[in-house]
Image (cartoon, rainbow, N blue to C red):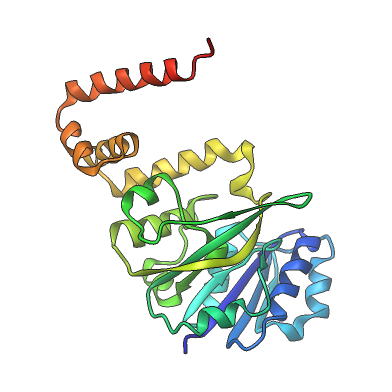
Amino acid sequence: MPTISVITINYNNLTGLKQTVASVINQVGADFEYLLIDGGSSDGSKEFIQQNQHQFSYWVSEKDAGIYAAMNKGIDRAKGDYCLFLNSGDVLVNSDILNKVISLHRNESILYGELIFDFGEGKEKLAKLPKQLNLLHLYSDNIWHPASFIKRNLLLSFGKYNETFSIAADYEFFFYTLGIQKESSYYLDFPISKYASDGISSLPENADRVMNERTRVHQKYLNRQQLKVLENWKKYKSEALANWISKRYFLNSVLDNLLAIYHKFRNKKW
């Protein structure tokens, strides 16, 4: 049976950290280790970790270079077959969820499941993903870290997370491994975790930063023609049509204008 390394990173989020730790240490029936990487918090997080250090296979509290540097520390220390990144504030949906995943005896490179978005004040939304991933989905969207079990060897062979990104290194990893390299994946058709929607990539003020870094990823792995095809695929929902249009530059421009006019009139309030 596969083993799991749960990795939690934290920085000055004591309240969220307590919730996350409770959801992990209360897991039953599963073979897993728990690693906690703290960025040198000053809000009592370090003291909480020290008080509960017997619950962790490894822990550290020291300044680091950011989110992905902290995640990479966890990868370096992990020993499980799969890594699950559950950052402070995120919680596993119930005490049996790790056992449920392990009991499936899957061996794909990435197992990915559903996620509950927690908007606070009792407002939650269950989000699902396609059962079959393709490059278009990964070009325009992502899969979710707190609901993804990633083979540790895949993380190591990729070179861990690219620390030149401040907000989209996990996006680059999934885009390249699943979209470009076509690594194997398996859809877990049940919720894995509850995600605290105040995370850095979810904040409205970071939207431009997210898009800019994702654009860097696209330009790193795709040429101009591939980018054009994917943009048209996203607009027209047809791979064959996208390929055909992308080779006809004048027609592409005409259809863009017609599409803009259509959306303008469809959204017009009479």
The correct choice, above or below, for 9 with respect to 252 in the image is below
Most distant residue in the front direction: 270
Q: Quadrant of residue 241?
A: top left
Seen at 32% across and 52% down, the residue is 135
Which x, y percent locates residue 219? 33, 43
Seen at 26% across and 36% down, the residue is 228
Q: Can residue 79 be seen?
A: no
Q: How many marks?
A: 0
Which residue is nearer to you in this view: 13 or 149? 149
The correct choice, above or below, for 239 with respect to 24 in the image is above
Q: Can residue 20 be seen?
A: yes
Which residue is nearer to you in this view: 117 or 213? 117
Seen at 47% across and 38% down, the residue is 212
The correct choice, above or below, for 177 with respect to 236 in the image is below
Q: Is residue 213 left or right of residue 233?
A: right
Which residue is nearer to you in this view: 32 or 267? 267
Which x, y percent locates residue 78? 54, 79
Most distant residue in the top direction: 270
Q: Quadrant of residue 132?
A: bottom left
Which x, y percent locates residue 138? 39, 51
Which x, y percent locates residue 208? 53, 35
Q: Is residue 12 left or right of residue 212?
A: right
Q: Quadrant of residue 204?
A: top right
Q: Is residue 34 left or right of residue 236?
A: right
Seen at 15% across and 32% down, the residue is 247
Q: Is residue 38 left or right of residue 45?
A: left
